[in-house]
Image (cartoon, coloured by chain):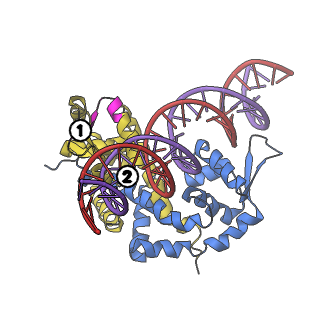
Chain colours: A yellow, B blue, C purple, D red
Amino acid sequence: MEDLLKLENQICFPAYAFSRQITNLYRPLLDKLSITYPQYLVMLVLWEEKEKTVNQLGERLRLDSGTLTPLLKRLAQKGFVNRIRSKEDERIVLISLTEEGSNLREQAKDIPTQIVSCLGVSIEELIHLKTILNKILIN
Amino acid sequence: MEDLLKLENQICFPAYAFSRQITNLYRPLLDKLSITYPQYLVMLVLWEEKEKTVNQLGERLRLDSGTLTPLLKRLAQKGFVNRIRSKEDERIVLISLTEEGSNLREQAKDIPTQIVSCLGVSIEELIHLKTILNKILIN
DNA sequence: CTAAATTAAATTTTACACAATATAAAATGA
DNA sequence: TCATTTTATATTGTGTAAAATTTAATTTAG
């Protein structure tokens, strides 16, 4: 009869702690590009697709407009993205890369390998972890 | 030659999304106890040990005083913990359970099983996930 | 064709997170 | 002893998160 309310027995706590550890690992690397980890995630999406609505970014990153709107304003202020209201449907705000935002990709290209080496675990194990997490993630 | 800067290829993104999903799963359950997920983590520690310094809580939960101080003030305001400055060493603030804080445990006792059923994965898989996460967590 | 419903963002509010700094008490050392 | 360093917490500032509400624009139903 083990006590399920012991911190030791929680699965959720290591997941929560790991997530924060990730942000902290990225911070010194992303500081050089003067962006934060959630801002980096937005850039990852835009480097793939160039233009997205706020809604589409939110779906992809599982974040809502209350989080994204101020975050995107900060990215725009730094000159990495454009925020342009759509002509066809004026409720929609289109987020696109600026020249500078596109160029940032070059400076980011070594970040993934640096992070993996910081984590100090084999690639196989990380892929395994990713597989489990994706299975648990709702949708 | 796969592109490591694709969101799809990130290990960190599912970990980040999973952590937020956890908080969102706990929210409706914890709303009934009128505490948040980080506050719940503090309560888990106190239900085990009754009295801790701010420092000890921070070490256990990997949170710093900038996060804990206001969080603990909110828990104190709700009447679940006492914040008492130590007589022996006045730099130290001792956090202990109130009667009400102790009683809250009874109301929380079914939360772990409810969360596990929400996650919709086998116990074995969750334990496996926990093992990997604990291995990656620094320290 | 227009009132009602729906949709997309933005805003507001509350609560983390964490870096950097401040404050104050205790321990240390010449 | 008393200046110096260390330790413990608090404060400040910036940046997420997410619920709830608001605003404005589009769609749909009658």
Residue at the image position 38 percent from the left and 56 percent from the top? B17
Q: On screen, B95 above or below A50?
A: below
Q: Give the range drawn in magenta.
A: A75-87
Q: Where is residue A46 in the image (x, y as percent from the top left)?
A: 23, 43
Q: Quick one: D14 or A16, which is closer to the camera?
A: D14
Residue hosting label 1: A96
Which image quarter is the N terminus of chain A in? bottom right
Residue A97 can be seen, yes or no: yes
Left or right: A46 as drawn, with respect to C5: left
Residue extending farthest to the left is B1
Q: What x and y, as percent, mark residue B96? A: 74, 57
Residue B80: name its quadrant.
bottom right
- Residues B6 and A63: in front is A63
Label 1 sits on a secondary structure element that is: strand
Q: Are marks 2 and 1 on the same chain?
A: yes
| Quadrant location, the C terminus of chain A | bottom left
Q: What amino acid type should be assigned to the residue bearing mark 1?
A: Ser
